[in-house]
Amino acid sequence: MKLDIELTSPRLYLRPYKLADLESHLIAVQESYKDLSPWVEWCHTNYNQQDAHAWISASQMNWKLDNGYELAIFTRHHDHFIGTVCLNNLSQLTNAAELGYWIRSSSHQQGFAQEAIHALARFAFDTLALTRLEIVMHPGNLASQRTAARCGAHYESLSRNRIYSRGQARDGLVYALIPEDLSKPRP
């Protein structure tokens, strides 16, 4: 898949990461440490430029190999970096992928996650021709649960040992989006 793709929504544009995004990404992760670290292993207290560079390099390689599609999210009018939305764990067998997201702490509760998720889901269904997207999260991550529900994703299960993090298998909540969910009015 090409790295010059850009998705847009009324307030946002989403595009693959570039090395020029390193500083913006690093600052956003460091700002959001308290909100991210309980849920994602890669966010740690000493997250630094080397970590950010590795993140961006891995993201670019995933695009080139069609293994995953991670997009940096920016506001359209101010070109302000606000987070990431991604498709990973793509499965040809089930024609599905997992959808993940994080929004920097200073941009929470403004509807940006829902807008970015909708844009990426449209890309997944229309361009990649996927038929299912799963959003998997820790049971304690209430903010992510609210976001998934607001996007029109349906709660499907509490799956045992669904998340492997910090050397342990943990239960995970599974929400799913299918193409028809995007055509329904969102709350």
Image (cartoon, rainbow, N blue to C red):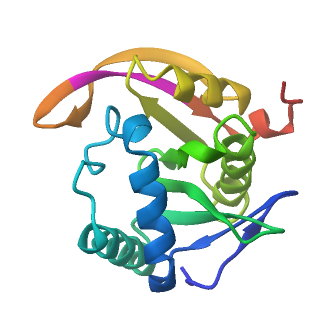
Seen in the picture, residue 62 relative to 75 is either above or below; the reply is: below
Seen in the picture, residue 83 relative to 34 is either above or below; the reply is: below
Counting from the top left corner in percent of width and height, residue 115 is at 75, 47
Camera-side residue of 169 and 38 = 38
Q: Which residue shows up at 51% across the image and 49% down it? A: 95
Q: Which residue shows up at 51% across the image and 35% down it? A: 135
Toward the left, the furthest residue is 167
Counting from the top left corner in percent of width and height, residue 97 is at 48, 48
Q: Which residue shows up at 28% across the image and 73% down it? A: 54
Is 180 inside the magenta-drawn segment?
no
Quarter placement of the C terminus: top right
Counting from the top left corner in percent of width and height, residue 47 is at 27, 58
Q: Which residues are magenta?
A: 170-175
**Residue 64, located in which quarter of the rendered image?**
bottom left
Position of 165 compared to 6: left or right? left
Residue 89 visible at all: no
Residue 23 visible at all: yes
Q: How many marks?
A: 0
**Residue 38, located in which quarter of the rendered image?**
top left
Main SS, magenta residues: strand
Camera-side residue of 18 and 3 = 18
Quarter placement of the N terminus: bottom right
Seen in the picture, residue 29 relative to 71 is either above or below; the reply is: above
Position of 109 compared to 81: left or right? right
Q: Which residue shows up at 21% across the image and 35% down it? A: 164
Camera-side residue of 157 and 102 = 102
Seen in the picture, residue 109 relative to 46 is either above or below; the reply is: above
Counting from the top left corner in percent of width and height, residue 183 is at 86, 38
